[in-house]
Amino acid sequence: MFIQLCQRIRALTLQAEALVDNNQIEQCLALLVERQSLLEQLKEQFLSADHDPELSTTFTALLHWIQEQDAVSNARVVKFREQSKQESVAQVKVKKALHHYKNVT
């Protein structure tokens, strides 16, 4: 069961990353909530195991991998947010210019 949970968590992480790439942040958040629940289940299984070194290695490797993947996805989300802000500012400038032009003519 432990290995299956690890595999499911990895799959959810990759799916969430794909959703970030497609700028589908809301769907990504839903997957991250599910992943968090599975991580909590995995933690309980890990803590109930009798300090199995193999499980410890697998658990630690998974957490490091998730941390690396999340750092990349987080950077993309920040980039999308900045891009969105810039587009919004440009749109406001265009609206003001159009409004000013209408008032002049």
Image (cartoon, helix red, strand yellow):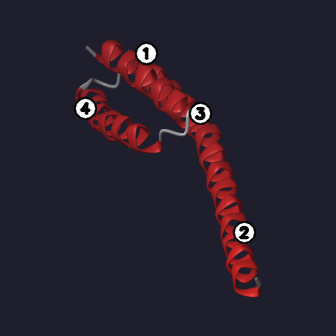
Earlier in the chain: of badge 4 and badge 2, it is: 4
Q: Amino acid at mark 3?
A: Asp
Mark 4: amino acid:
Gln
At a point 48% along the width and 22% down the height, the residue shown is 57
Where residue 44 sits: x, y (%)? 24, 33
Picture residue at 73% right of the left edge, 82% below the top: 100
Find disc 1 in the rendering and name its residue: 54
Q: Residues under labels 3 and 1: Cα distance?
A: 34 Å
Q: Hey, which residue is sitting farthest bottom in the picture?
A: 104
Q: Is residue 77 above or below residue 41?
A: below
Which circle marks residue 94 in the picture? 2
- Residue type of the residue flagged with mark 2: Val
Q: Which mark is drawn over residue 21?
A: 3
Q: Which mark is residue 32?
A: none
Q: CA distance from mark 3 to mark 2?
A: 28 Å
Q: Quadrant of residue 76?
A: top right
| Residue topped by disc 4 | 41
Local packing at callout 4 (Cα closer than 10 Å; few below 14, some 14-19, many 20+) is some
How far apart, in angstroms, are the residues tagged by discs 4 and 3?
A: 28 Å
Q: Are marks 4 and 2 in contact (CB under 8 Å)?
A: no
Residue type at mark 1 is Glu
The answer to whether 48 appears left or right of 36 in the picture is left
At mark 1, the secondary structure is helix
Query: Comparing marks 3 and 2, which lies closer to the viewer?
Result: 2
* Eye-nearest disc, 4 or 2: 2
When the figure is inspected, residue 3 is found, relative to residue 39, above or below; the finding is: above
Mark 4 touching mark 3, by CB under 8 A? Answer: no
Residue 5 lies, in percent from the top left, at 32, 20
Seen from the viewer's position, the closer of residues 33 and 40 is 33
Q: Nearer the viewer, residue 33 or 42?
A: 33
| In the foreground, 78 or 6 | 78
> Distance between the Cα atoms at labels 1 and 4?
18 Å
